[in-house]
Amino acid sequence: MELNKILLFGLTFLWVCSSNGYSADRQDGKFEPKLFQVTTAETRPNDAVLIRGEYLDKIKTIKVFTLDNGNVGNAEPAYVPLPAEDRLPDTNGTDLRTGPLASYKAKTVDLLQQKEQSLKFIVPEDLKNGVFSVEMTDVNNEKAYFYLNVPIVRWALSEDGECAVAGDYLRVQGKNLLRDKDKAHAVLVPLKGGKNVRCKVTDFFDDFSVSVDIPDNTPLGTYYLYYHNGMGGKTAWSEPLRIDVVSKSPDWWGVKVFNVMDYGAVGDGVHNETAAFRAALHAAEQNGGGKVYVPRGRYMLTGELILSPNTLIEGESKELTHIFWNPLNWDLYELPNSLISGTHHFGLRNLVMWSSRAWGVIMSTGPVEEQGTVLLENLIVRQTGQLSGMIYQVKSNRDQVEAEFHSRWSKTGIILRGKNLKIRNCVFNSAGMYTFYAAGGFVQNCRFERHTTGTNQPYMLVHPKGLIFEDCYKQGDGFGYASSIDESRNLYEARNYIPFDYTNDRECMTLDGGSGGYYGPIKSVEGNIITIPEDAETNQWTENHWNGGGVYIINGTGAGQFRRIRSHTLTKIELDQPFLVQPDATSEISITTVRHHLYFINNEAVDVGAYQLYGSVQNCVISGMTMTRCNGIVGRGSLLYRGKQPEWYIDIVNCRLKEGNYSHWFGIDDRGHSGHQSINLIGSGGTGMSIGTVIRRNMLSEYSYIRTSPGANPDAVTDVIIEDNSFDIAKNAVLLGGNATNTSGVLIHNNRYNEVDKRLETNVAKDSYLVIDDNP
C-alpha cells in the first residue's frame, strides 16, 4: 500500500490539506496561516501550546477536543501530518475527523500572545486527557487542524543498525511513545504492496524509547513503520518511518577459531607473546576472519596488534584472561598510534587489558564510509599513566614532551567509528580521549573513568548518527557532542550517572563548537535555490564545504525554519527542499551546523558544571534530569566562532534540580562562575537565537531557579513556556533577563512556589511576558 492511497474520507482529505496552513498565498491578497512548528512535548489539560508559523495573526478562533481512544483494530494506519520546521508538509496524511465536530464537545480557547509568527493557547482544564485535536479558523473562515500527544517516531535501531531484523527486536525512539501500554503497538506496511505486519511492543523504557518485536516470518523488504501509543483512535498513528527489514547478520568473525597457544603463546606473564598473537591474527586474516582465542593466563605484549576485518580477539573470561603491554624502551616519538586497531568488523571480548605509554589503546582506523560493526564486550581496560608518566620522568626537554602530548591529545585513548558499535559491560579507565565518531549502535552498561595522573585530559567526544548510550557511569573532564558540519542526529542518552567534572567550565555535557559559513541577508530565492550577495562576508566558504549544514531563517519573514544544504557555490545554495515560507528582503539567514533529535533522558549529575545545549541544536529533549550542586541546564543559541548558531524548539521537562548552591573553581576567581543552579536560556549575538523552549513540570529547590539571558537584540530569546514547575526556597523563581523585548513572548503559567522571595524579577517590557494562574 502506498502512502498516497491512505485516504479515509475521500476528497475531504484534499480540502483539509489545502487549508491545513500549507497552501499558497491567496491571489486576492489575503494570506492564509502557515504552520511550521507546534508543541510536541507531552501536553495535558491546562497545559499551554505554542504555534510557530507565518500569518498567525489571521487566526480568529481555536477549538480543542479530545479524540476517542477506540479500538484501532486491523484498519490501515492513518495519521495527521504535523507541521515541521525542517521540511515541507507531508501531503499523505488523512482527515483527522471521525465524526461531526459538534459531537466532541469542542472547547473554544483564548488566543494568547498572538503575533504574526506565533501564538499560544491553553488546553481546557476540563477536557479528558488523551490525543487532542486542534481546529483553527482564520479570518476567511477556512480551517486547519493538527494533533497534540500523537506518537512521533524519529528513528529506530536494531542489532544490525538503522534497520529492522526479522525475528529480532527493534528499538524505536521518538516522543509520546509511552501512554497506554496495553494498547500500544506498531505496524509495518509494505512499500510495494502485501500484507501488513503487526508488531508487539515488549519494553517501555520511557516516553522516548520502546522496544518492538519484529515477527520472524516478516518478509524481507522496505516498509513504512507506524506506531500507536494506545490513545486517539484510528487516525492517531505516528507519521511513517521508512525502514528496511533484513535478515539477521551472522557474527562477522564466523566459527573458525585460532588459539594463540597453537602459535607459541605461553600465558605466564613473563614471555613476550607479541609474535604469537600476531601469528594467530595473520592466520585469521588469511582465513578471511575468525576468532583469535586467548585461554586463561597472563600475556605480556610489547607491540601493537592490528585486526583485519572480520576478526575477534576473545578471552576465556575477563576474570581469567589478562593482557598487558610492557613498552620496554619506547620513547615518546616511537609510541604506537594504538595498541589495538582495526578498520572495520572487528571485536574484543572477555579480556582485561592493561597498558601504559601509548597514544591510543583501541582505535578504528578505516575511512568513515567503510566503518561497520565494532564489538567491545566484557572488557576491563586500564590505561595507566599514558604519557604523563614519561613527561614527569623526563628531566630535560619536559616542555617539548608536554607540547607533543597536547598536540596529539585528540588522538589518544579509545577512538571508535562505525554505524554499528556494540560496546557493552565494559570498564574503561583512560588517560586519553573517549571518542565515538559518526557513531551508531549501542553503548550500554559501561563505566568510563578518568585517570588523573599528570597532564591527562580524558574528555569524551561523541558524534552520534543513530546511537543509544544508556545505563553508564561517566566520569571524565567533560562530554561533548560533535559540531561537525555533517550533522549530529538521533541520540538517545538515558539513565547515565555523571559525577565530578573539572575541565574548563566543568560542563558535564556540551554541544560546544561549530562555527558558521555566513549570516546576513539574501539576494534572491527561487524554489530551493538561495543566492547570497556577491560581497557577503563568509567564513570557511569554499565550494561545497558546507554541504550537510543548515540554512536557518533567524529573523524576518519565515523565521523559525531551516533546510539542509545539498550543494553550493560561492553565491548559490541548493537546499534539500524549498522553504514553506520563503525568505525575502526582511529576512536574515544563518548558515551553520545541524544537530537535532538528541534525547537526554533520566540522567543524573552531581557536582559538575552545565548540562548544556550549546550552539546549534533543534528539536531536542532534556527530560527527567536530576542535578545536585551543579551549574544547571543551559540552552544556548549564540554567535559562536563566527557562526550564528540557533537553539530552537527544545523541551526541558520533568527535571529535578536540588541543592542549588554551586561552586566552580573553589575560591580562585570563583565569583563570576559560581552561584545558584538554574535552567538558563541564552540568546546572544542576534535575533532569533533561542526560539520555542518548553520548560515544564520541573522541580527546583534550595535556590535553584529559571532564567533567560538574552543579548541586546530584540527577540533574542522568544516564545518560551514556563509552566507547572515547582519552586521550593529561592531568591527569585523566574528571572527574565534583558530589557525592552530582548526576552519576549514568555508565558508563565500554573507554577507553584514555597518560601520564594520573589516569583518574577524582570526589566523587560510588560507586553513581553504574560503570567496566568500562578499558584501560591
Image (cartoon, helix red, strand yellow):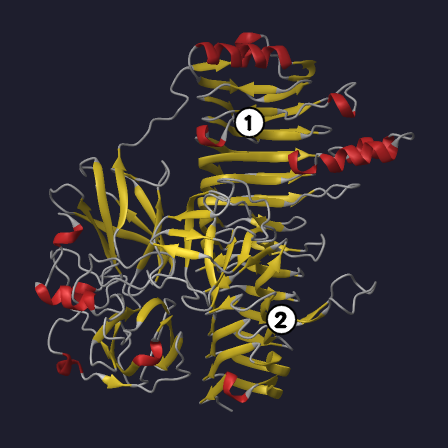
Comparing 27 with 76, the one in front is: 27
Position in image of residue 27 (x %, y %):
23, 71
Which numbered marker is on residue 365? 1
Q: Residue at x 59, y 8 (%)?
A: 264
- Mark in the foreground, 1 or 2: 2
Residue type marked 2: Gly
Residue 339, x across and y down, in percent: 63, 24
Residue that sits furthest to the right in the current view: 396
Number of marks: 2
Amino acid type at circle 1 is: Thr
Residue visible at 23% across and 69% down?
A: 20
Q: In the figure, 28 relative to 770: above or below? A: above
Dot 2 falls on a residue whose secondary structure is loop
Q: Is residue 524 visible in this depiction of the protein?
A: yes
Front one among 310 and 577: 577
Residue 740 place in picture, x, y as percent? 58, 82
The residue carrying pointer 2 sits among few (fewer than 14), some (14 to 19) or many (20 or more) residues within 10 Å by Cα, namely many
At which x and y percent is residue 379?
55, 34
Residue at the limit of the structure toward the front, as seen here: 534
Q: What residue is at 57 percent from the left and 63 percent from the top? A: 636
Q: Earlier in the sequence, mark 1 or mark 2?
A: 1
Classify 343 as above or below 383: above
For the residues labelled 1 and 2, the Cα–Cα distance comes to 43 Å
Which residue, given by chain and number where applicable, does mark 2 sit on? Answer: 711
Q: Say what secondary structure mark 1 lies in.
A: loop
